[in-house]
Image (spheres, coloured by chain):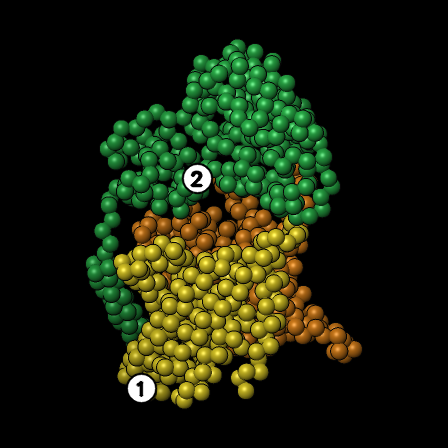
Amino acid sequence: MADENGSNLRQFREGILDNNPVLVQLLGMCPVLAVTNSLENALVMGAAATFVVVMSNLITSLLRHLIKPHVRILIFTLTIATFVTIADMALKAYMFEVSKKLGAFVPLIIVNCMIICRAEVVAIKNGVGRSLADAFGIGIGFTVALAILGVIRELMGSGTLTLPWGAQSWVLFQLSEGFEPHKWIVMVLPPGAFLTLGVVVGITNQIRARRKQGGAA
Amino acid sequence: MAVILTIIWAGIVLFILTLFFATLLGIAKEKLRVAEDPRIPAVVDALPAANCGGCGFAGCADFAKAVVESRAPCDGCPVGGSKTAAKVAEILGVEVVETFPYRPVIHCAARTEDKLGVVPYDGVQTCSEAHIVGVTQACTYGCLGYGDCAGACTFDALHMVAGKPVVNYDKCTGCGACVKACPRNIIEQIPFKQEQMLVVACANKEPAREVKKVCRVGCVGCKACQRIFADLFNVTDNLAYMNYDKYTAELGDAEFEPVLAKCPAKALVYFGKPKPEYARQLAAEDEAATPV
Amino acid sequence: MSIGALIGIFLGVALVNNLVLAGFLGICPFLGVSRKVDMAFGMGCAVTFVITVSGVVTWLIVHGLLAPIGSAIFGPEHAGALFFLKYVAFIMVIASMVQLVEMYLRKFFPPLYTAFGVFLPLITTNCAILGTCLYIDMKPETQYLLNAAVYAFGGGIGFTLAITIMAGIREHIRFSDVPKAFQGAGITLLVAGILALAFSGFAGIGK
């Protein structure tokens, strides 16, 4: 039992660092680029995705002995679609402004490759504990990656840092008026998204290569 | 009340949709059926599913189709080896002939210090680019040492050591990616009839005095090997070629001793799994080197 | 409903609001399949076909099934009562369409099937398809079937354009000296950023 838990903890940690869905596995890129134009959007998207992957892994793991192999992708997709509908409606109810800014990307969580991947690789074969640990790890890893990008883009692009707080956003931090002419608007536009993600992925690869070198030497 | 109505009608709508698509797909399955030989999926199951392309076909499914249509031999899968060949032959109901595994050997024995005329090259550090540039080293036939072959290997079986590719025959599956990657075509897959095979590790076709200018260990075409083993070695264009059809399993250290002694260059090299004593020595060195 | 309006919709989604470079849809195949021009073009054609068909069918489901049933059961002001089923319905449509396209190609166009047969199952999780269906549903200008069809087709063409251009550029990058950490996804994203900048120059066309 201790070993099970030990490896559960490792599964959780791996989802955040070694197996980060965005920076290492390079899955789920579409929402990453689209919603990181502000920290608030990034955190809400991360929370929504975490909810969906946790519930999806939970249900899949509970039903794993009943799902026939040749319909499993369909079952996964329908389960995920159901939970995304719930998440979308909850966001529209409690955080309408943010939901409008996120636009079509909340329903697009349905086709986010990382969620189906988790169900296919972990939830269908393991018990509830392991699947939940994995889901939380992946969800938090996704949110962390989104947050990093969100901070960079929002600070450089609008000079603010906003956090989600109920119906309105809470401006955590705002650079002074003097920053206005130095705002780098392109950062909150599509080109800035690609450039930021490209640089962050490059830096991540460099860090991982250094760690591997350091470990092997 | 509205909630219950919503739930009921949601269920009905979903039911209609599911019925519609299930019917559509069901009809399509019949109308758009493509008759497939049942042996094909059976062969696909027997294959190692690496999808490496080593068989020359686009993936395991393509190879299975080719085998069933008699376009490929049963032993065409180098990764699966003789076990897979036997299974495939059983599915097709044919006799299988014992074959030897084909593994790559490199026709160049030069380490970086053996090469003469090496110039500092700051261009794209790949063999294909250096080959096009042409003047990064004096020998225009031999290994360039930038490791395109090592990069092509997906089984972690090929590494560059002292500027020369070294194959780990325990991990090598014979898929042939390294053969295709080498721009100088000096990697060749030969049948490994024994654990250790003797190879002419040189590809230089120039006469002796030219070879000596470019490399310390190149074959000079002196024909000494051909004089000792007339049917195994064939020297043409100043280069010795080994005839692997005539290479039998009885040839070993004792038989090759005189040839190795006579060869003035050091171009005759054994390729293969390390001998047991050497393997033990390597393991001991590894243990000593790893910090505790 | 004039030709001008339709052309406007087409150019709008193909160039100005390109699905990949401005809308952030379909990034995964954009990064994964854009290594060679012929593969990229094949993927683009497959996606265009599936997008157009799915766009039309999802429009029909929303306007022809969900809305009428909603009006009939709950009254005309509550036509949207069953709209929460949209996502489930959309994904069912897309999955079935992809399956049908695969079967159809296998039967009638075998060379085309072997050329990009392996991409077709991947298209199911392609956010460009689901995204287009959702945008058709959300935008006011696509409330007519013809507009929706043109929008979907334009989206597919825009995707094909972006992915093919990217493949062409990547074939050249192979011979450039990219730093190790940026090889693969890193440099592709940076190039995509520059491409996005270039495409944002089309923004004036709508006027």
Q: Can residue C1 be seen from the camera position used here? A: yes
Q: Which chain is green?
A: B
Q: Between B190 and B237, which is closer to the camera in this rendering? A: B237
In the rendered image, the vertical position of residue C144 relative to residue C174, given as above or below = below
Residue B15 visible at all: no
Which quarter of the picture shows residue A142? bottom right
Amino acid type assigned to the residue bearing label 1 in the image: Gly
Q: What element carries label 1?
A: loop
| Of the pair B219 and B277, the residue shown nearer to us | B219
Residue drawn at the location 60% of the way across and 77% of the way down: C201
Image height check: is B129 above or below C34? above
Chain letter of the residue carrying label 2: B
Colour seen for chain A? orange
Q: Residue at x 42, y 51 (%)?
A: A120
The chain containing the residue under callout 1 comes to C
Q: Nearer the viewer, residue A162 or C105?
A: C105
Crowding at dot 1, Cα within 10 Å, few <14 / some 14-19 / many 20+, comes out as: few
Residue in the image at 66% along x and 68% along y: A153
Report which residue position mark 2 lands on: B54
- Do the residues indicated by labels 2 and 1 lie within the same chain of the protein? no
| Res C130 → quadrant | bottom left
Number of disc labels: 2
Residue type of the residue flagged with mark 2: Gly
Q: What element carries label 2?
A: loop
Give the colour in which the image draws chain C. Answer: yellow
- In the picture of the structure, the residue carrying the numbered disc 1 is C75
Could you tell me which residue is drawn at 62 percent across and 46 percent down? B132
Q: Position of residue C32 (x, y in %)?
A: 50, 57
